[in-house]
Amino acid sequence: MTTLPTSLPPHEGPLTEDGLVQLLTPAGERVAHSDPYADALDADRLRAMYRDMVLARRFDIEATSLQRQGELALWAQALGQEAAQVGSGHAVRDQDQVFPSYREHGVGMVRGVDPVDILRLFRGVDHGGWDSEAVSFHLYTLVVGAHPLHAVGYGMGLQRDGLVGTGDAARDAAVITYFGDGSTSQGDVNEALVFAAVNQAPVVLFCQNNQWAISEPTTRQALVPIADRAPGFGIPSVRVDGNDVIATYAVTAAALDRARNGGGPTFIEAFTYRMGAHTTSDDPTRYRTHEQEEHWRRRDPIDRLKAYLEAAGELPEVFQAELAGEADALGERVRTQVRAMPKPPADSMFEHVYATPHAVVDGEREAFARYEASFLDTEEAHR
Amino acid sequence: MPTYQQFPLPDAGEGLTEAEIVEWRVAPGDVVSVNQTIVEIETAKSLVELPSPWSGVVSRILVEVGTTVDVGTPIIEIDTDPSGTAAPAAGGGVVSGAQSPHGHHEHPSRASEEPGGAEEIGAARDERAETSGSVLVGYGLGSGGSGRRPRAGVAGATGAATSPTAPASTGAPVSTSPATASAAPAAAAAPVAAPVPPAARPAGAGNGSAVAAPSTAAPSSGSSSSGAFHALAKPPVRKLAKDLGVDLEMLTASGPGGIVTREDVLEQANRAEGRTLATYPGDDAPWLASGTVSADGRQTRVPVKSVRKRTAEAMVTSAFTAPHVTVFHTIDVTRTMHLVQRLRGDREFADVRVTPLLIAAKALLLAVHRHPEVNASWDDQTQEIVYKHYVNLGIAAATPRGLVVPNIKDANRMNLLQLAQALGELTATARAGKTSPTGMSDGTITITNVGVFGIDTGTPILNPGEAAILAFGAIREQPWVHKGKIKVRHVTQLALSVDHRLVDGELGSRVLADIAAILADPAQALVWG
């Protein structure tokens, strides 16, 4: 049996007192530490990340309003987690595959998902919303913690297709899956860790620890940092400041490179904070203090990058004004397009059940059509 | 031209069916922008702010503060094109052909001048009630789907009882199906009955709902003879209406499928009864927004709910399960007042409020420390007395929403400064109405500070599940025998109620005596602390 590299974290970065890799302090100052991935980020790339974070937040706020206006059945906010999502999302390459939970709107937008399409699911007019193969971004999984197994399975498929560790950087692929602190208490996630480890699957297990599993704090789920669990499975892990977009990018890029090169899985715990509610059905004022929220509001990931870019003179007013206009236009487009989303035809529920034609489903579709046709008012009048 | 859009109450959680309007942030005439907060509602889960879906001018608030309405009920009307020309007169409007796919009702003409405003909401609620099973999530009411759709060859709900059973063939043409004889005209007429006032639309028009159509479409489609309209009611209800002299045809039906219910008849009969005039002008207005005035105009009746209801239940439970005994003590607290004065000048206590209540709380905690048996509860189910190793000190607080008793968790582990901080936080949270359910649960002993109302003392009722409660009375300057002379001293009264099932008079007296001893001479705390 080969010896697995479980003792060393895959990324040696400067650590905060809490043991988090951090390259950008909450005040927006770059920590004096040379990192090949972070150093490669030029001002254009950082501005692109800043833009993605601002747009992700604008979208999030618009979606929350739409839910409150009755246009969406539910909405899961990602407020405060923009750096963890945009930073890691920027490390993904086109040949990679992303398996998100249901809160990775920022990652999806970086991957090229139209945010309006994300809302199709939350409005209840579609089971998915986008072509997951075209953007390498799998559909959302609402079942908590179910999808890391899919991700590991996909990674094992990549291994069997010979797409891992060939030395061809344009071809070697990896998988990244996103889940929250709460889902690490689920059996499925632990099973995924088992399979990822023993198969040395090219998977990055990206845990956004936003500190709250709905109303349960992380302290009620783990007595050690969540990242510390992974070495027990044989997977090296790293804790990163999830509100630091540069560190998150660097750590994820390193882990994805390791996976593509055949180095096996990595567990990343991005320590961040859910500034909003779990979903629009949740009221966080019932279980957490205003002081805690205020403390984290002062550690806003967007403010941090903004402070850094401004201090470096890399955030001209023209850029900011254009971005503000772009954000408002996005908000309006999302609002208009969501309201105009048509009700899906009722028989669309039979689509995508199986990839190939299926006799039972065909029979059900026909029976349903007969049933619908038996009504005296027409379908049009009914709408 | 002005375009009036009505905002139906959305489901702010998953599967909620109703919410209460807590506060309107806008008023008629206000200009609103998209996503501006317009109203705060309270659902079974949380307080939620709702943003405006449109920009425009508020034309009407449709639901008053304090009212609980079903999801889908229009709550506000906004003119989204206020700079447009005047709308055509009521009745001459045209039904806007397109309802948006998610159920915003666009209103073509002003309905506000009509007395039917209230009925309009009522009608929408009726529809809601009928379909509540299918609108548990999402965008409130869809524009379709209300009522049961008529099916060919299926014995329907529309009078099929009197018709021969139709053959079970599918796709039978409308005209040949006897089962639909009564439904067909209404269903066919509804979509073309153009000038339908909003009052009738939600239930009847647009979707050809055969069930709802007969009751609501008929009054509105004026061309069809109203004489042909017959109210639906069961025989006993018809008899009741006859006995009471109520005309069924005049009633608004609230039953499923538009049938007149017993309650509808009784309500109409009550309304018809002569009302006694109020004694004074204006005396027949409700005293509280959430209440209604009784038929004689001399009483306001307010439904018992939320905090009031919980308080009542808790007090009944406590008063009639725990035999209360109350002991009293009058004491000189001048030294406590000196201590309070000194602490107020202390830098360590600069950021907290130092009050006599704080010292009383500390005194109670010390007394509990000396007599832990009082910090207990009676478990009737298991026939056990449960002694608590912790003290969650409850403080009864009068808040805008009523009496709440939040408690300070593990108060026995706090020093005076921590206790002062916790007390300040607890009061601020309670006054803001933000006390969480956990903040009120698992209390072990309570103080009620009746002194703040200028009251000397009282016989407090135990918080359920606790064995003692201390009433802290007003502190007054009074003549008092001090060191053999009559002096002006600060005097107060303490009352301690205990659950006599587990606390006897002796223990209760000792606890109260200890509290009194500390308040009379705070230095005693050094001895016992």
Image (tube, grey):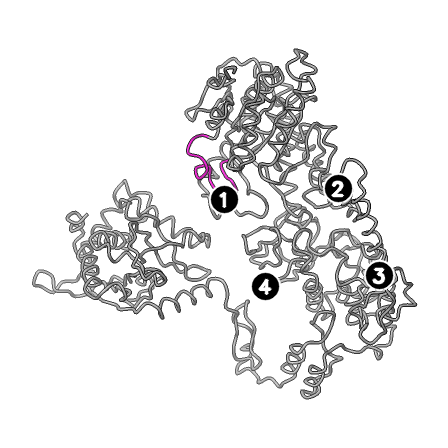
**The magenta stretch spans residue A12:** no
Q: Secondary structure at mark 1?
A: loop
Give the CA distance from mark 2 to mark 3.
27 Å
- Residue lying at the far front in this picture: please name it: A1
Chain letter of mark 3 equals B
Name the kind of residue labelled 4 in the image.
Answer: Thr
Quadrant in the rendering for residue B136: bottom right
Chain letter of mark 4 equals B
Q: Are marks 1 and 2 on the same chain?
A: yes
The magenta stretch is A210-225
Nearer to us: label 3 or label 1: 1
Residue A27 shows in this picture: no
Graded by Cα atoms within 10 Å as few (under 14), some (14 to 19) or many (20 or more), the crowding at tag 2 reads few
Q: Of residues B271 and B243, which is closer to you in this image?
A: B243
Residue wearing tag 4: B67
Do labels 4 and 3 touch, CB within 8 Å? no
Q: Secondary structure at mark 3?
A: loop
Q: Is residue B246 above or below residue A62?
A: below
Q: Of residues B188 and A314, which is closer to you in this image?
A: B188
Q: Earlier in the sequence, mark 1 or mark 2?
A: 1
Chain letter of mark 1 equals A
| Residue B163 in the image, given as x and y percentages of width and height | 84, 74
Q: Secondary structure at mark 2?
A: helix
Q: Are marks 2 and 3 on the same chain?
A: no
Nearer to us: label 4 or label 3: 4
Name the kind of residue labelled 3 in the image.
Answer: Val
Q: Is residue B142 above or below residue B310?
A: above
Name the kind of residue labelled 1 in the image.
Answer: Ser
Residue wearing tag 3: B94
